[in-house]
Image (cartoon, rainbow, N blue to C red):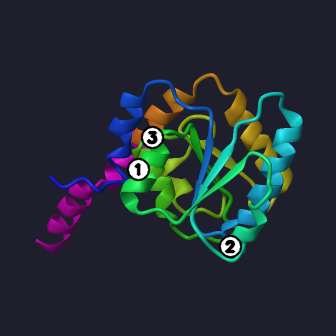
Amino acid sequence: AFTPPLVRAHPARRAAGARPRRFRYCGQYVGRKGFDLLLAAHAEYRRRVADPWPLACCGKGELAGAIRGAEGITDLGFLQPAQVREAMAVSCAVVLPSIYDPWPLVVVVSAAAGLPVGASGACGSTVELIRDGFSGFTFATGDRDALVEALERVHHCPSLPDIGRRARAFAEPYGTVQWADRWITALS
């Protein structure tokens, strides 16, 4: 069976061993994705903890200039799917603070890769995939302080590998084979 490159990040993450202490953002650098909110929240998070994790961003957009000079943030730019897989393999958690996002695929892909996801309530896929503190982390949409607190929760969480395993289990029904089976059944 064909496995999309992004889903193959899970074996790469397992092979990498210990999870690097790094946040990851994958998406457009635009306001509706909450990108500016994430940059502000990450700066505040860095002030609050003694050993802050860096944030690596994959994407492009009108707010890319805001990353320049931001302490602890790296702009990897737009990445092809195989490169995103490699980037996820060296991450600890994915953060998506969208203001409006009906079904962000990055939540499903990240969960399938075994990564805990922190996402705003505006991310439609969180309803199916994230149970706060069990298979990921949620926070109030557009609330910088809630996002800062979520970053701190992830930072201090001793059970991130377990949360990642549960996230992966929640993502299983969205795999390509499962979707193909649903369509075959529906069209039969």
Any mark on residue 109, and which? none
Mark yes or no: residue 146 visible. Answer: no
Q: Position of residue 139 (x, y in %)?
A: 72, 50
Question: Horizontal and vertical percent for residue 24?
Answer: 59, 48
Residue drawn at (41%, 50%) of the image: 85
Disc 3/disc 1 C-alpha distance (Å): 6 Å
Name the residue beneath numbered marker 1.
Answer: 85
- Mark 3 and mark 1 residues within 8 Å of each other at the beta carbon: yes
Numbered mark located on residue 30 in the image: 2
Q: Which residues are magenta?
A: 169-188
Residue at x 24%, y 55% (from the top left corner): 178
Q: Residues within 10 Å of mark 1 (few under 14, many from 20)?
A: many
Label 2 – label 1 distance at C-alpha: 22 Å
Query: Which of the two labelled residues, at mark 3 and mark 2, occupies the earlier sequence position?
Result: 2
Q: Is residue 144 above or below residue 52?
A: below
Specify the amino acid type for callout 3.
Answer: Ala
**Helix, strand or loop at mark 2:** loop
Q: Quadrant of residue 65?
A: bottom right
Where is residue 93 shown, x and y percent of the image?
Answer: 58, 41
Query: Is 185 or 57 nearer to us in this picture?
Result: 57
What residue is pinned by disc 3?
A: 89
Q: CA distance from mark 3 to mark 2?
A: 25 Å
N-terminal-most mark, 2 or 1: 2
Most distant residue in the left direction: 188
Q: Is residue 103 left or right of residue 175?
A: right
Q: Residue at x 89, y 39 (%)?
A: 47
Q: Disc 1 on helix, strand or loop? A: helix
Q: Which quadrant of the rendered structure holds the C terminus?
A: bottom left
